[in-house]
Image (cartoon, rainbow, N blue to C red):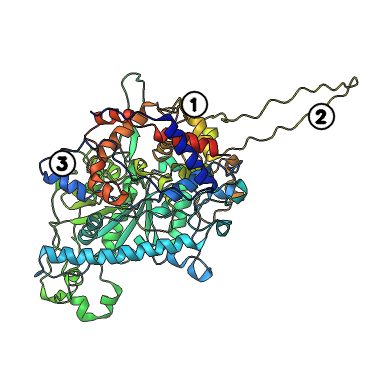
Amino acid sequence: MPRKKITNINQKKTEQKLKRAAKRGDIPPLEPKPPKLRHPEFRRIPTEARPDVDAARKLQSAFVKLPREYLDKTKLIASQLILPRPIPGEAAVFPSIPPKDDGGSESSTAFTCPKRPKWRFDMSKAEVEANEDGVFRKWLAETDHLIEEWRDEKPPTTESEQPEGDPEIDTPEQLPAEMPRSWCYFERNPEVWRQLWRVTEISQIILVLLDSRCPLLHYPPSLRAYLATHKVILVLTKVDLSGPERTQAWTTYLQSTFPGVRVTHVESCIEKKVQHAEQGRKHYEPHIPTEFRRKLVEAIRDIHAEMLKPPAEVKKNEAWAKRWTPPVKQNIDWDAVLSAQGGKVGSEVGGAVVPLPAQQEGGDRGEGEASGDRKHVEPEFLTVGVIGQPNVGKSSLLNALFGVTRVRTSKQPGKTKHYQTLFWTNELRLVDCPGLVMPNNIPMEMQVLSGVLPISRVSAIPACIYFSSQRIPLEKIFNLSHPTPPPPPGEDKRTWREGSGPHPTREKPVEWTALDILIAYAGSKGWVTAKAGRPDMNRAGNDILRALVEGRIAWAFWPPGTDITVVGDNNGNGIWLHEFDRLDAEFDDHEEDSAEQEDADEGVSSDINSECDGVSEDEAVGGRFDALSLEEESEEEEVEEEEKEEDRP
């Protein structure tokens, strides 16, 4: 290993003076130094080609990278804006999207999901994929344009006062009254969208899973438009975290907002019974209550019964009515479906083995194939697709229905990479689709709070903590002490007559910012940075977000239009549900477990991450032990941090 370059103190002081002079504007801005590799001698050793690893890399989710200017600006704003305490009751109500006719956002109705283009049997695989890639690229450009238009609709209050393109804010008077609107994350990998296309093509009934804490976020207009021609059942999951009152309120809201769509709710796990006292975290196993199972099976059975009857358009034409045949399997033993558990239930089968009905083949495969040219073949079994955004509990629901663990689950969103076909009974099969982040006019901070995005890939931690703290009293939940307590009152040297005295002074309420919460939480855990010894705010924010996503801090929104005067303001606690918290049952080892699990899941994502996040593959180190050598790098980063601290007011 080459020797470290000796630091010249005089040269170092000269560089510091030049940097400060450039910041003051006394001299022209200095030319930025070219980025240098920390350890260019380390290179990742090429491995042998493995089909399973290559397939996993192709199915790795890809998202947009946030610009550095936005990250710096939101961090500074999060350190200055005071959080509202107590939290107003309106913060507990999920925001409604106004219709376009009432002056609402036109882009809210313009978001779509990419649809698979038509194809023919005489087309090769390369031709089909090239056509799909072309359609997807066009859709991606249009969606990015809509996202930018949505971000520009409501700029911050004082945004016009800021110089364009300058992210730095020098004085608190220039701070905007709110955070700038962030980007909306959505899936940018066409291979993941192909999984959704395949699942919807082979499924006769679609189960759309919605997190009961904020269902509308998981059922955006883009997904509703994509599933307009399918038979859909809305399934509210994680009802044990949202509570019965909010679950019932959301059920009523969805039934009134989407008439004709069946809505049911489930919970998919139960605490394991232990034979003797054990320390540590509680463990859960897949389980669905009998009543929830019965309601779900009844909803599927009712839609199946509707599909056995000809549509209204066919009934009007006698010739059509005579030739019409049901597009699904007609005879199904629903009692066996209701009682099926264990054994071979949930066994996996590969491929789409069900022949599609003749009525659907012509529409999906091309105009040249009419539905009357093919003889109808009754499917061997009923196919039910299970779709939804990441971390809504699709795989957990399947394990609960089967009574045994058949599908891998994880706290990390996006564990399922490829769609899986599993038998419920000999006559009914379920298709588990990987989670997709749908385009919607929802900010990134809300997506992080709901668990749609993996925490390990969240860069705007201060902005996310600020968003969550506006709705959840994090300092109260963790019993934090303010990092800068008020000064003690001065000694009163005045004399008073007997029976009189000074009037009691009213204590000034403690004002919190998002960075105050991060600093206080890091201090309570003893987390500091390696070199400077400052509170490790990134680690603190990472741990807080995990607690919110994993349900250790229970929270849930009320549906739009809820009257706060009727349901109450929750004592100024916003969306926090302290009676359902699991913090007391958990211990600190959860962080290491979650981090190791995410590292394992992210291990195969280097190709797509480098393409979307701007990381060069040459910069990757050889392994975990190579990180030890990072301590021997130059002290320039630490010096820059000290300069920022000195210049900060």
Label of residue 503 in the image: 2
| Distance between the alpha carbons at the discs numbered 1 and 2 | 36 Å
Is 522 displayed left or right of 282 in the figure? right
The disc, 2 or 3, on the residue closer to the chain's N-terminal end is 3
Is 508 displayed left or right of 641 in the figure? right
Nearer to us of marks 3 and 1 is 1
What amino acid type should be assigned to the residue bearing mark 2?
His
| Distance between the alpha carbons at the discs numbered 2 and 3 | 78 Å
Is 344 displayed left or right of 106 in the figure? left
Q: In this view of the protein, which residue sits in the foreground, 468 or 261?
A: 468
The disc, 1 or 2, on the residue closer to the chain's N-terminal end is 2
Does residue 166 sit above or below 42 in this rendering?
A: below
Residue 433, percent from left and from top: 25, 52
Q: Badges 3 and 1: C-beta atoms under 8 Å apart?
A: no
| Distance between the alpha carbons at the discs numbered 3 and 1 | 50 Å
Mark 3 residue element: loop
Around disc 1, counting alpha carbons within 10 Å, would you say few (fewer than 14), some (14 to 19), or many (20 or more)? some
Identity of the residue furthest to the front in this view: 10
Label of residue 382 in the image: none
Quadrant of image for the N terminus: top left
Label of residue 524 in the image: 1
Residue 581 visible in the shown view? no
Mark 1 residue element: helix
Q: Quadrant of residue 133?
A: bottom left
Does residue 612 sit above or below 132 in this rendering?
A: above
Q: Which residue is mark 3?
A: 344
The disc, 3 or 1, on the residue closer to the chain's N-terminal end is 3
Quadrant of image for the C terminus: top right
What amino acid type should be assigned to the residue bearing mark 1?
Ser
Q: In this view of the protein, which residue sits in the foreground, 63 or 425?
A: 63
Q: Quadrant of residue 381?
A: bottom left
Residue 438, percent from left and from top: 35, 56
